[in-house]
Image (cartoon, rainbow, N blue to C red):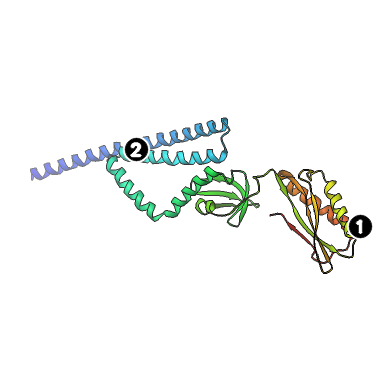
Amino acid sequence: MEDELTKIELAMERLLDNAFNFSLKIISALIVLVIGILIIRVLRYFIKRVTEKRDVDPTVSGFLLNMVSWLLKLLLFIAVVSKLGIETSSFVAVLGAMGLAIGLSLQGSLSNFTGGLLIIMFKPFRVGDYITAQNISGTVKSIQIFSTQVNTDNNQAVFIPNGILSNGTIVNFSRETHRRANIQISVSTTNDLEKVTQLFMDILKNNDKVLKDPAPAVVLSDLSGDAAVFYIRPWALRTNFWEMNGEVLLEIKNTLEKENIKIPTQSIEVFNK
């Protein structure tokens, strides 16, 4: 009976010792975790300050911050696991095997990662550019490791996978400093077409947002039935484009009414994309 009690006491002592030792490991792992999170935040802040002082492209600096964060978090995870008493060598081997298996099953994510690298390298667009891609139009807010955030005109955040984004057609409205409007207007062939041409050209010349170089153009492109089709093509700085476009359209309407220029029904079309 005494031997059994002795065995129970020894078992309880070993259990308490193991629990105490494991508690110490948990506490040390939590300390490493907290300190590691603080260090990661400090390093992110430091990298952000350095890139801002050196005027690094926001596209590159944002992608770099994401990459550094993922790498540091992975190292922190391994450090915490080692504090719990798990062999890091065997754990890294297991992690590598898991990574291979996960990589094979998540080939789409790998293609998104590669697409992000291609976007950073070749720069079809940057943070702050206005683009149209995958039937989405908006301002690029961030280029992340696996996706790009585009905010639409009504401020909805859309996340487009980098894989399909890098392999698809991208229209970048912010790349060039100048932009041309293409305004198509049809007037009746009963009007004096030379006078109409001069009226349209005067509208463009009198607008201070229409650039003199490249020169604006008014082209009579087609005579179809009772309609004479004009293309009005003013250039503007990208920053003034929409304001110029609205002013020219309003002035065209007022001029047509003032000069009593006859137009067929459904005669005005605007193409700015």
Please tell me which residue is depicted at 54% across the width and 52% down the height of the picture.
Answer: 165
Question: Within the image, what quadrant is residue 38 found in?
Answer: top left
Please tell me which residue is depicted at 85% across the width and 53% down the height of the picture.
Answer: 200
Q: Earlier in the sequence, mark 1 or mark 2?
A: 2
Percent x, y of residue 34? 40, 36
Q: Amino acid at mark 2?
A: Ala
Please tell me which residue is depicted at 29% across the width and 36% down the height of the picture.
Answer: 24
Please tell me which residue is depicted at 83% across the width and 46% down the height of the picture.
Answer: 207
Query: In this picture, is 85 found above or below 110?
Result: above
Task: Report the front residue among 201 and 37.
Answer: 201
Q: Tell me: 106 left or right of 134.
A: left
- Image mark for residue 79: 2
Percent x, y of residue 205? 84, 46
Q: Tell me: 247 left or right of 5.
A: right
* Residue tagged 1: 259
Q: Tell me: 81 left or right of 262.
A: left
Residue 86 seen in render: no
The secondary structure type at the circle numbered 2 is helix
Task: Report the front residue among 127 and 7.
Answer: 127
Percent x, y of residue 20? 26, 38
Q: Quadrant of the C terminus?
A: bottom right
Residue 48 seen in render: yes
Residue ranking furthest to the bottom: 225
The secondary structure type at the circle numbered 1 is loop
Q: Tell me: 57 left or right of 8.
A: right
Percent x, y of residue 56? 56, 35
Task: Report the front residue among 258 and 89.
Answer: 258
Tell me the distance, in whole angstroms, between the alpha carbons under discs 1 and 2: 80 Å
Q: Amino acid at mark 1?
A: Glu
Query: In this picture, is 80 found above or below 235?
Result: above
Query: Within 10 angstroms of label 2, few (less than 14), some, or many (20 or more) residues?
Result: some
